[in-house]
Image (spheres, rainbow, N blue to C red):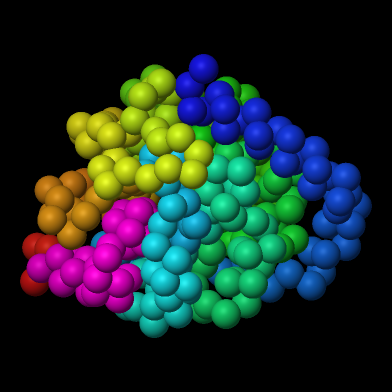
Amino acid sequence: MTILDSILTDVRREVAEAKSTTPAAELEVMLADAPPVLNFADALSQGFGLIAEIKERSPSVGPMRAENVRAAAAAYASSKTVRAISILTNQSHFGGSIHHLASIRKSVPKPVLRKDFVIDEYQILEARAFGADAILLMANILDSDTLRRFHDHARELGLEVLFEIHTEEEIASLPSSARVVGINSRKFKSQTGFVESGKSSATDFSLDLSAFTLAEHLPPGTIHVAESGLTPENLPSVAAKFHAALVGTSLLRDPRGLPACLADFEQAIAALPSHS
């Protein structure tokens, strides 16, 4: 069993519990009070920047630094380099919740991405009802028909979709209407590189940064996002082929504090050729 198999088992349980607690009919009612949708794609089109993440922990390295997590929302909201905010809503493996997303969405003026393992249309409705502006759809867990159907549902609700791919074959499964596509360098289908629950690792062994070379195969005209494993040091080597980088662990685990790490990213982005 891979870490992805384990995560999906828990996701199915969490979705069933959410449906029992807040039926879809209640979510439909909540839509009227959801904050207006902020345009995720437009935000990523304003020059190279970050989708900065908030999560409590990760299966690849363990817990984040609590003080960095607490500082994240305010720091991201004030940073000119952060274009959007990614919030993990999976509880079992990342310590998040849809209620945490709703709370942060009320306090930040930037688009918020619900980053989760979306396997049910209920999660799409739930995302918009609680204030998300975009959702993640992963091509390594959804077939092409489901990707298209989920994308259509999301767009009907006003949500943007960040499609995540890991292989060239997964690129071929994307709907022709895809606007934002991310390449994730994390090997979720590996049986190694992940820590046991409650433990921590100083190094993330689940990454394969060579995945970013797939950028040349992404559909023309789409917004390209580099996901996972990025630091201020290696960012310049991949930035030329991408419009944004999704960064979480580097920011949330830095022992100097999140503002210091964010400042390093801002400096690295300011030095990119397109910013000179």
Q: Residue furthest front?
A: 199
Q: In this picture, is 170 found above or below 85? A: above
Q: Is residue 35 left or right of residue 197?
A: right
As for residue 126 lying within the magenta part, the answer is: no
Which residue is pictured at 49% across the width and 28% down the height?
3
Q: Is residue 270 left or right of residue 260?
A: left
Please report the bounds of the magenta region as a residue range. Answer: 245-271
Which residue is pictured at 79% across the width and 64% down the height?
31
Front one among 146 and 189: 189
Residue 260 screen position, x and y as percent: 24, 74
Residue 145 screen position, x and y as percent: 62, 25
Residue 121 screen position, x and y as percent: 73, 40
Q: Is residue 260 left or right of residue 271?
A: right
Q: Main secondary structure of the magenta part?
A: helix
- On the question of residue 205 being in view, the answer is yes
Q: In this picture, is 30 found above or below 148? A: below
As for residue 263 lying within the magenta part, the answer is: yes
Q: Quadrant of residue 78?
A: bottom left
Q: Quadrant of residue 270?
A: bottom left
- On the question of residue 159 being in view, the answer is no
Which residue is pictured at 65% across the width and 34% down the height?
10
**If the image is split into quadrants, where does the C terminus sit?**
bottom left
Residue 181 screen position, x and y as percent: 41, 43
